[in-house]
Image (cartoon, helix red, strand yellow):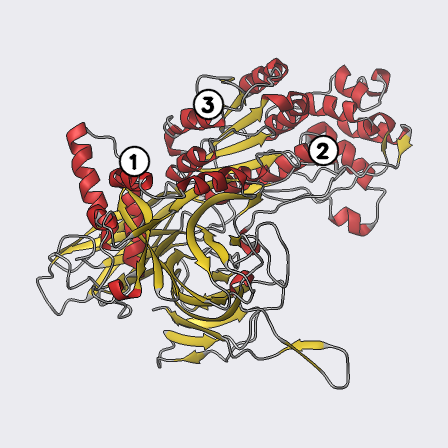
Amino acid sequence: MRISGTLSKQRRYRGLFSREWFFSSDPEMEMESMTVNVTIQDFVADVVSEMFFRNKQQISMEIMFLFPVDSDTVVHTFHATMGNTRVEAMLCDKKEAQQLYKATPGMENLRYLQDQWDLWGPVFACFLGTVPPNEEVAISLCYVQELPLHPDGAAKFCWPRQLFPPPKFIRRHLSEEEIPEIPEDLHFRIRLQSARGVSHIDVNSSCSPLQYTAPDQTSAEISLKSSPWIYDELELLVYYGGPHNLSAVVESRDPKAAPGSLLGDPVVMVTLKPSIPEVVPGPGHLGEFLFLMDCSLYQDAQNTLLFLLKSLPLGCYFNIYSFGATFKAFYSQSVEYTQETMDNAVGRISSICPDLGGCDLLGLLRSIYSTPLLHGLPRQLFIFIQRKVSSEEQAIMAEVHRYRDYHRCFCFPIDKCESFYISQAIALETKGKCVCIHSKMTMTSEAVKCLQQALQPLASEISLQWDLPLGLEATVIRKAPEMIFPGHQSIIYAQIHGKAQDPEADVATVTFQYRVGSQPFHYTLRFSMSPSADDSRFPVHRIAMMHLLWKLAQQGTSKSEKEDTWHSAVKLSLSLRVPSAFTSVMAVRMEQSDIEHRDSLLPDSSMLLSPSCNLVPCQLLWLCGSRPVWFKSTKFWMVQKCQLCLEMLSPKASHMEVLTQLSARYKEQKSFREEQMMEEPTALNTSWDWTISPLPTKLCNISSIRVVVALQKANGSWALTSALISALGLRKTAVEGRSLSEVSRSVSSVRKCHVLNFSWPQVYGLR
């Protein structure tokens, strides 16, 4: 959950807490204690938390609570209790909410917050009112979340440092060192469940030993003994046993709900993590590469686009877009990469003109997303941006989220540009990468490194086949993605309909099929239809409902069908308090005596407008500030040092013809270790690390390097032309009538320089 918080004064920094998530008009309110219960089942976390703050000042304080929300998290319960009053957030029909917002005093404060607060991204914001001196505020927050996959295969759960009580220190008698006491105000318990078995955990805080609560080690629990060190957030990695390619979790139905509805049927969560071997993709299996260049970067774009074009493999598809106030494509649709199309594109790079107007990234992305995938090939975008995208961040992220299973984005914001954080968000949403660019050389080298990552094999043509007991069938809510990239996984959800003909039939089978290049793979999993755990909180149902509501919001139907969809979606959203495009968040302040006379706050507009309820400003907002709302472990900070050396991209040909042999001649004079680094690559993903020193004098000039790159052919080779000879610092008479080996020997007589550390294959075409 990418949330973080404390109660504080605007823009003031005091004590141990960052003033990032909550604010008041007076000095901070300190957290006194907390109780958190987390249940993690495979890759879904269910969090129930209660935090207690107290106003220790001698003055009353007006406070506000806000916390970030993201596309993988459902916050379904929030309420705050202060003395005899209680503020509770709830959902209601979005159409009715417009009337309620007009009747809510103080809503203009949220609009001010949206434009003036220094955070960036989607948040839940709720004014809590005035807290008298020494008054306690109890805040309850409950949410479910799809956990991200750690690179080593673990499920990763985080809890922000701002939501821990401030540590109290004791001083050792024999030294001046201060150490934290074991807190009595921290109650943090984590339960772990998985049919594969819980193998082990890794946590950056002191905790009790992992205690198994089932003989087969399918469940366990731990408790924190202390919060992480002062400036660290809690980070828990959970490792499961058994195979990691395919797993399933079944969650039981709600007996109170009607069979056939989502809540009235079991839901199965299937995790797909394909094994992707390193293979050489054949022509046509390399995908589609789209380069989006901000026109304000036209001067820097020349070299970067040239190096990227020269690095593409034969048989892939590509296109180049320039965007500013409007956008323009080199081709009406992506074209196959051949010698002819490469030459044409290189010739058109100089046609990118400066445009100091707006930045229509939203229009460009919509145009790209409306185009079907070419032959089902993976689509990967490289976005170079410098200008602010106006007030369209929320619409852009909605589009990116809608198509996140169909593409991947590599983003390159210019250092300190206003689009830095939305670039991070786009890359994070599509499982790509965001790199901050500090110089022209960094732009080219980082773009080429990301292209190397983009050329790695991936899983495509993904499908699932179900074999359920007779009488049951599966309806997929979130279908399998078009592709899964290396190091990533996908989680799908399916609703199980019907009634088994044989009540004793309890075993189902799901088969996961995909291809890597032309090589097929399949895995089969047998799993029990009995619920994996008795959980009446329905975390898996809530995540599944979130995806179903997203799908309903994207459906384009007739007016009457849209009305029917709207009403059913609102009913669905309210049943488990899952926010959606059909509902809005409201909040009411009520006296405790009124609350005790009823079981819950019913989300009905007539009730909300009654005299016994006071509406409170509360809304989901998109902030347009200068700092991302994610906490540290989920930020996409990929700030790179300015590098002079361009790291190479794997060759797309198994030999380098002229320049490879010239390079080899230099390497003969190096040590044995350097000779080992020079071995001829045999596959697409072989990584070279050749340091060519000394170099011909002319190659110490960047413009000469660009000339050599420009002369490279689409297949990775060079023709021994006069232009190449000149760029290499040779004389035409020295190479006429000679073989390549003789030419390479003649280079040794050329005057050398020992300054640059460019890698030869990297510089010459980045192969």
Residue 395, percent across and down?
Answer: 42, 33
Instruction: Say what secondary structure mark 2 lies in.
Output: loop
Q: Is label 3 in contact with label 1 (beta carbons under 8 Å)? A: no
Q: Residues within 10 Å of mark 3 (few under 14, many from 20)?
A: some
Residue type at numbered disc 3: Ser
Residue type at numbered disc 2: Ser
Residue 671, percent across and down?
Answer: 84, 49
- Tag on residue 6? none
Q: Is residue 323 above or below residue 424?
A: above
- Label 2 belongs to which residue? 439
Instruction: Say what secondary structure mark 3 lies in.
Output: loop
Which of the two residues, 764 or 30, is positioned nearer the viewer here?
A: 30
Residue type at numbered disc 1: Gln
- Find residue 560 and report its image quarter: top left
- Label 3 belongs to which residue? 334
Q: Residues within 10 Å of mark 2 (few under 14, many from 20)?
A: some
Residue at image x 51%, y 41%?
Answer: 427
- Tag on residue 554? 1
Q: Report how far apart the C-alphas of labels 3 and 2 lie in the structure.
A: 29 Å
Residue at image x 52%, y 29%?
Answer: 389
Q: Earlier in the sequence, mark 2 or mark 1?
A: 2
Instruction: Say what secondary structure mark 1 lies in.
Output: loop
Residue at image x 49%, y 50%?
Answer: 277
Asked if residue 575 lies left or right of residue 722, the reply is left
Q: Earlier in the sequence, mark 3 or mark 2?
A: 3
